[in-house]
Image (cartoon, rainbow, N blue to C red):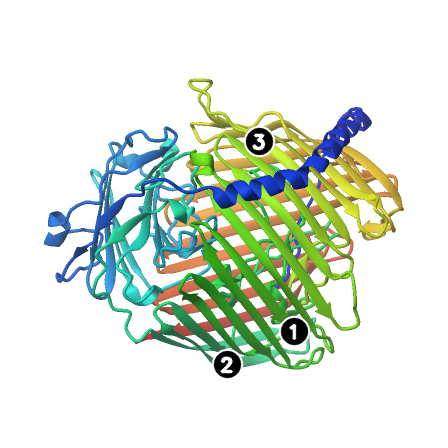
Amino acid sequence: MPGLSNSLSHATEPRLDHSRLLSAGWLTFTRARSLLLAALVAMVALAANAQDNGQPRTVAVTTTSEKIIIDGSLDEAIWGSAPRIGDLVQQQPLAGREPTERTEVTLLHDADNLYIGVIAYDSEPEKVIGTQMARDASISSDDSLEIILDTFRDQSNAFYFATNPSGAYVDGLAFTNEQLNTDWDTIWNVRTKRSDEGWIAEIAIPFKSLNFPAGQTSWGFNISRNIYRKLEEDRWSGARLETEFLQVSEAGAITNLDGINQGKGLDIRPFISASWLDSDTSSDDGTDAELGMDISYNITPSLKLTGTLNTDFGETEVDARQINLSRFSLFFPEKRSFFLEDAGVFSFASTGPDSPGGVPSAGADIFPFFSRKIGLVSGQEVPIDVGVKLTGKTGRTDIGLLNVRTGGTSFVEDKDFFVGRFRQNLFEQSYVGGLLTSGDPIAGQDGKTYGADVRLATSSLLGESQNLVVNAYGLKTDNDGIDDHEWSYGISAHYPNDKIVGEAVYRVVEENFRPALGFLRRDNFQMYRVGASYNPRPDNLLNILQMFHDVFYTQFDRLDNGLRESSELHITPLDWHFKSGDSIHSVIDYDGGYERLFEPFEISPGIILPVGEYRTDRFSAVLASARKRRLSVFINTSWGDFWSGTSEQISTTLTYKLPPKFTFEFRTNQTFAHLPEGDFIARILTSNINYAVSPFLSFTNLVQYDNRSRNLGWQSRMRWTLTPGRDLFLVFNQGWIQDMDGGLRFSPRDTKVSAKFQYTFRF
């Protein structure tokens, strides 16, 4: 599954006096550093004492015994007689105002389903946008409806459902009040229909698809309508610029959920998979067929036990290519369904905070548990014989337990892995938690990681409608043959609001800290990061929706010698987003960098950078056209110093849509480096060609090439949902290798065809 992708660099122009700029940044930072920990402590106190004083909306769900047919028509009598939940309120661009288009939302329930009926009126129905139809497609550039259900009323985690005028199925899990995992799939039903007055959505969510406490008749609920051509979002609850839709704490409440039925809470999903491989690089040619099973059982209405036997991941998408031009590890996200479901339970406060868009990441996230370490060793797949997972709640405590046994191969013996996680929810948006992992995928090795974390958050700071999140954590590893310097700890404060965003982070990773079931990009460092963004919304100025201005400084010091290893000063002087949807993300962003190599670094085959200090000044410009158009373009260029020389980088994305069935996307990411040690080009080309016959039958094609591996790969994937819960996957993978002299001559390598059929029995 691992691939190659890029973390590429940029392009060439006259240099500034970088020593003056870096000295100014360093002076500012050294002054700020002495105040950082004191400021963080003060922010902890503010977050712990702040109270959320908002008055969320509440509505009773209408009980019905009438049979509801999900066809997008809302023609049953109960839809006309049941009360509406009330008008939505504009969240942006003009927070608190009446929406420009009317939306009627009605909620019903019987013993088995929650029904949601929406009439999305539009004064220009011919301009309603619905370009995507495939399961879990990105509908962020479409008109859409989004729904969250906080069934536990913990104001932090929720089930997520979304659709668009073309009837796309998008579902996921929202967790820790800000993150979303749309790789989670469940059984539900939606139909949409366009009309002369706009569009209609009719949704049925089975209670068997949800977890909730027994006897609780009130859930957190919110719904949002997005009118993309106007860049307008209308919400039922929490319609403030400072509030993201995934802030579950801002949801309202639905009541009268009496007499609902979760059934026995048992899902049995047997599957059969088969594959054929013709390989020039492996001795595993031939055919293979497997039987397996996934089982889930609600031990209580709020605690779910999930098991997998003889697990197969043949339907999983391949990784995006990356080319590594840094000295540190690349991150590849998890894509396997067993590990993705309820993944939010295992999240930990050692990641983030997420910086504003366009601001470079600090690259210092620590994942004490990273599920890709199970079943994958050095890029090679290891069979998973059996896995068991217990997730859910008891009272106000979140619980996650995972145990997996992998089979032996020619390079590793049978292994057992265990992960335990708990979070005790505090106040309205906060928690304190603990984590333990046991096991090491490397042959003959064993290791443990354990630690604790705390999150203190509020959306009503000092009685005002402002967000503040403070995270702190401590972790220790216990690996074979290592006795000391195995700690990581840190604290961060994040002030994520519409007009002003602030961030302060302090993090330490000791030189022997090695989470055997985790991931970290670098070690042996002490990191500081401070930054802020000022984002005004000018009235009637050049049709601008919002302007963004950023200043962020990040520094890494080595723990073993106390020397600065790297630093970056990032300044965005101009970032304009227009009401048309077009944007000038930057005219001339500035990045002042510093790197110190303590040992030689091979940045490209045969090109070795010597030990020493490297100071760089780089500039970038980004232009993006509105995604609502049939043809849209994104261009990111950068230029300036690059290690001992210079480089130019250009990243482009061209997207063409024939809505709602066909989408073509072509991306390039290229770095042209000119160094005294040698010149090189790092190039990645990617094409996505997707066709959806209906929301139930879709074809995706991914073609990728990078000149570092000289590998050209093509994955073609079909997903056919006969009915929700019954899926057939067909996957074709073909690889080619480019001749050593370059050009257009490629020789075929591996060819693989896979098929998988899964059928869910629900009790």
**Residue labelled with disc 1:** 439
The quadrant where residue 618 appears? top right
- Label 1, secondary structure: give it: loop
Residue occupying the point 85% across, 46% down:
597
The quadrant where residue 39 appears? top right
Mark 2 belongs to which amino acid?
A: Glu
Residues at circles 2 and 1 in contact by the CB criterion of under 8 Å: no
Task: Give percent across and percent down for residue 174.
Answer: 44, 54
The quadrant where residue 482 appears? bottom right
Residue occupying the point 58% across, 53% down:
349
149 versus 22 height, above or below: below
298 versus 695 height, above or below: below
Q: Is residue 617 left or right of residue 677?
A: left
354 versus 122 height, above or below: below
Which one is in front, 140 or 441?
Answer: 441
**Residue labelled with disc 3:** 533
Work out whether mark 3 precedes mark 2 in sequence or the reverse, and give the earlier one: 2
Task: Give percent across and percent down for residue 418.
Answer: 58, 73
Mark 2 burial class by Cα count in 10 Å: few <14, some 14-19, many 20+ = few
Q: Is residue 211 left or right of residue 24?
A: left
Q: For the N terminus, which image quadrant?
A: bottom right
Mark 1 belongs to which amino acid?
A: Gly
- Label 3, secondary structure: give it: strand
Mark 1 burial class by Cα count in 10 Å: few <14, some 14-19, many 20+ = many
Mark 3 belongs to which amino acid?
A: Ser
How many angstroms separate mark 3 from mark 2 (CA)? 53 Å
Q: Which mark is residue 290?
A: 2
Work out whether mark 3 precedes mark 1 in sequence or the reverse, and give the earlier one: 1
Which one is in front, 610 or 355?
Answer: 355
Q: Indicate which label's residue lies in the foreground, 3 or 2.
A: 3
Residue occupying the point 53% across, 70% down:
753
